[in-house]
Image (tube, grey):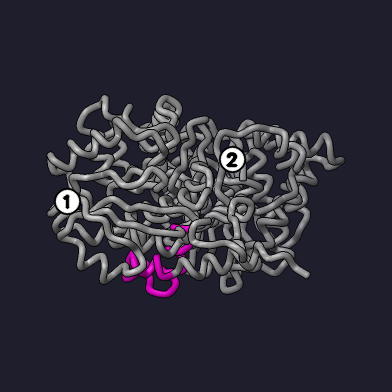
Amino acid sequence: MKIFTAEQIRSWDQFTISHEQVSSIQLMERASMAAAHWISEHCKNHKKLAVFCGNGNNGGDGLAVARILYLKGFDVDVFVGDSKRKFSEDASVNLKRLRDLSGISVRKFDHSEHYNFDDKTIIIDALFGTGLSRPLEGGYKVLVEQLNSKKNIKISIDIPSGLSADEVFDNNPVILKSDYTLTFQCWKRTFLHPETGKYTGKVEVLDIDLSEAYADTNTAEYFVIDDQLIEYIFKPRQEFSHKGTYGKAAIIGGSYGKIGAAVLATQSALRTGAGLTFTLAPECGYEILQTTCPEAMFIAGGKHFVTNFEVDKDFTYGIGPGLGTHSDTEKSFLSFLKNYTNPLILDADALNIISKKSGNIKLIPKKSIITPHPKEFERLFGSTENSFKRLELAREKAKEHGIYIVLKDHHTQVVTPEGKVFYNITGNAGLAKGGSGDILTGILTSLLAQGYSEEETCILGVWLHGRSADLASERYSKESMLPTDVIGEFGSVFEELNRKATRSL
């Protein structure tokens, strides 16, 4: 799914209006119907709504939602701003339609100070939409602060008021903190970054039938990894295949006291379909690895830490889990990089070794995949003000060095050498545990070994990692799930993918 800017979304609306014989007020009604339907379906235990509407088209959506839900049997109170401020043309139409109904009150914002927000009341936020270009100020700022102080469930229409669609505002702006955001047609970038995404709550993308022709013909630099993209990438296993068909994956990692990281990466590679899986680790991990991963072949790479990185040229390497940064490991690893030209998966201590000298980054082979978390990224490329700036720096570095950067975060970003960014929306806070990154290294190594392209490997890999974590959290909870529980759900996810890939009779 493409992520369009606020400006592109406005153009998308206008294109739909001009090419599909629908008026702007009809398009507003379509959006409002979608939002009202979601609310009526999901808020059956809450029949009282306090709807706060601005003067623009987002306020028009709110006014229409209030009318539709009132006619569905909800107890609705509407709050609007100073009548001296002119409403948009479509908002004015919906305000008149609302006033024509008996039994629904329209009040001023300041009346909300004495309003009874009981525990059955849901606050609907329709103050500002995606056109907001500066932080809230004055009365709107005070109003949002007041609403944020309420414990009631809050639902934002299209975007939480005070939030930009495309950027983070400076100086701690006041933004409505929603429990749910009912956004239209596509994700907004700010929903996907930690500084701003914390205001959206659970995001629901509602299809309002904006023009497909516009979406197909207009370019985007940012994308959300959706089911359609995954189904396009995934390749079902062929019946007349053999182990040689699916490549050779080699996990290089482990050191005294950190063999578990190599175990997790190896188990992950085994469970995601590599034809042959090898683990190059120090001898101190031999019994552990042979016991926990009997399907993988062990290669001794040193005594207590890895000092030998050479295997076969036709292997796909995933290097870093538990590797350590011993001076002998560092020397051997950097020497290996100087003479190796095929794409690699690099994570954890492999990245920490590279980050010790700025020139080391140039040793990474073209089209390699690196998987830094924010601190590892900072050690490699420098600090940034926020995650938006970090992502833009990642785009620059991916282009400069011809590599893929999997920037791990709540919504992990896959950054390609061409500058495209794919946000992953699977996964949850249960992955905030040691070992989760080792699993991802194993997945990526296995998929690349099987013949997926580097871009496909990154996209499918982060999605699979997150989807498996979602299933693990359902079974064990985010608090109790372990990285091994995530590995245990790989089979369920592959079953889902294969069912979708099977042609119906």
Q: Nearer the viewer, mark 1 or mark 2?
A: 1
Q: Which mark is residue 3?
A: 2
Rendered view: 9 above or below 76: above
Residue drawn at x 42%, y 53% as measured from the top left: 248
Span shown in magenta: 464-488
The C terminus sits in image quarter: bottom right
- Inspect the magenta stretch and tell me whether residue 476 lies in it: yes
Res 443 quadrant in image: bottom left
Q: Amino acid at mark 2?
A: Ile
The residue beneath circle 1 is 302
Which SS class for mark 2? strand
Amino acid type shown at disc 1: Gly
Q: Is residue 222 left or right of residue 35?
A: left
Res 421 visible:
yes
Quote the CA–CA distance across marks 1 and 2.
48 Å
Horizontal arrangement in the rendering, residue 228 relative to residue 302 (left or right):
right
Give x and y (percent) for residue 255: 17, 54
Which sits earlier in the primary sequence, circle 1 or circle 2? 2
Within 10 Å of disc 2 (Cα), the crowding (few <14, some 14-19, many 20+) is: many
> For this view, does 60 lie left or right of residue 160?
right
Tell me, yes or no, whether the two marked residues, 1 and 2, touch with CB atoms within 8 Å. no
Q: Is residue 147 visible?
A: no
**SS of the residue under disc 1:** loop
Percent coordinates x, y for residue 221 in the rendering? 56, 33
232 or 196, nearer to the observer: 232
Quadrant hosting residue 363: top left
The x, y position of residue 135, in whole percent, is 46, 34
Residue 217 x %, y %:
72, 34
